[in-house]
Amino acid sequence: MGFSADSRRHVTDDPAAVDDSECTVLHIDMDAFFAFVELRRRPELRGRPMMVAGTSGRSVVLSATYQARAAGVRSGMPIGRAKALCPSMVVIAPDHEAYYQVSRQVMAIFADVTPLVEPVSVDEAFLDVAGAGRTGGRPGTIAVALRERIRDELQLTATVGAASTKYIAKLASGLAKPDGLLIVPPADVIDLLHPLSVRALWGVGPAVEKTLLGLGLTTVGDVARTDRAWLIRRIGAAAGSKLHDLAWGRDERAVTPESTELSIGAETTFAVDSADTVFLRRELLGLADRTARRARAAGQQGRTVAIKIRFDDFTTISRSITLEVPTDLSRTIHAAAVELLDRLGPTRRVRLVGVRLEGLTARAEVSEQLSFDDAADGRPGWRAAETTVDRVSARFGAAALRPASLLGGRPERPEKSPRTGQ
């Protein structure tokens, strides 16, 4: 794979043709996230220049569509300047709660692949997929599948950079935007990195750039070829060491998951809308199982179980129930989810269902030896069974052991949806 010094757009056209064996760090960045979330709610604005910004004259652009960006509009730009560049642009007031909710859906998709997810902001995260190969395939395959799932389930696009370090993965995603994928094997790092401007180095803003340019260093390669001790004397020990390491693509930082979460859950979008209660209960079982496994992996229990239902007209509702004691067991979560579903009564066709465990606390160890069939939560019999499944899944993949009702083929799917014709 070759890279040119003046190219601002790199895309891996054929991930299978790239040696991605060491590219287990993914940086996933949602494209124009706030703007695209708004376009989902206002499809009539697709193809038009639009920005998300406050109404105050001192507000700045939070996000803009690529039609607006083509006119020079950028995030962080004062809205007066943005309107001057693109007078026909539509301005939408931000809805941060909506963005947060969609962000949770995005992060849940990431967590389906690996527990090693490090959110950077509401619209980007690092993933370590080194342990996901058995179920997800090669890193490039995982990256492609994630982008497709985000597009299919959320009607959004994401750009992915894959490399052996966080720095190069983030650099790759920036170069591949929008809606691209760039895989950078270790052997290709120097060819990609050295021709770039010093601004490509992590942490180099206008002030540091001015200093480096004053030293005659205009490209990353210039920094790399500079004597390390000389650079340290000129710009300081911390900055000099960091920039010299980055200039050679060296970055020892690991992907670090968030230590605390507000909730843990999973959701799925059906290929065909369904009003079949038996089918919906079965899907809730699979989601409860995934949610419980994630909770146990994080050492968390939750007191509140919530379900999310999206109908075929895209209206979405949430319902929740608070348990007497916190749980991390799939059978308890599933029972609560089914109770919530049953409370809805006869339902319209459903497009998406989700299960979440909320009100998280650190799991308390249970010392009493209760019966396997004890109705009290926290029972070591059920816990022993489910944690055994966790250990098998960790070694052989999530599909190695599953609840019996999830084995084999799916029940007969509902008749063709009048909305999709599928």
Image (cartoon, rainbow, N blue to C red):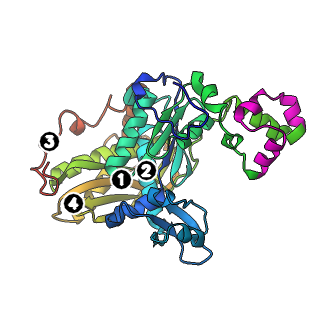
Between marks 3 and 1 in the image, the one whose residue lies nearer the viewer: 1
> Answer yes or no: do the residues labelled 4 and 3 have beta carbons within 8 Å?
no
Q: Which residue is found at the position 50% from the left and 56% from the top? A: 262
> Distance between the Cα atoms at labels 3 and 1?
25 Å
Using the numbered discs, state the Cα–Cα distance from disc 2 to disc 1 in whole angstroms.
8 Å
Q: Choose the circle earlier in sequence order: 4 or 3.
A: 4
Q: Is residue 262 left or right of residue 210?
A: left
The answer for how far apart the CA atoms under marks 4 and 3 are is 20 Å
- Of label 4 and label 1, which has the lower sequence position? 1
Left or right of 253, for residue 322: left
- Marks 4 and 2 sit apart, C-alpha to C-alpha, by 21 Å
Q: Earlier in the sequence, mark 4 or mark 2?
A: 2
At which x and y percent is residue 254? Answer: 62, 35
Residue 123 horizontal/vertical position (percent): 50, 53
Determine the main secondary structure of the stretch shown in magenta: helix
Residue 375 in view: no
Residue lying farthest left? 415
Q: Are marks 3 and 2 in contact (CB under 8 Å)?
A: no
As measured in the structure, the alpha-carbon distance from the residue carrying label 3 to the one carrying label 2 is 28 Å
Give the class, few, some or many, for how many residues have Cα within 10 Å of label 3's Cα (few <14, many ≥20).
few
Identify the residue position indicated by label 4 in the image: 312
Label 4's element? Answer: loop
Residue contact between numbered discs 3 and 1, judged by CB atoms under 8 Å: no
Q: Is residue 199 visible?
A: yes
181 magenta-colored: no
Q: Residue furthest right?
A: 233
Q: Nearer the viewer, mark 4 or mark 3?
A: 4
* Label ID, residue 411: 3
Which label is found at residue 154?
1
Q: Residues within 10 Å of mark 2 (few under 14, many from 20)?
A: many
User: Which residue lies under the disc numbered 2?
Assistant: 106
Residue 223 shown in magenta = yes
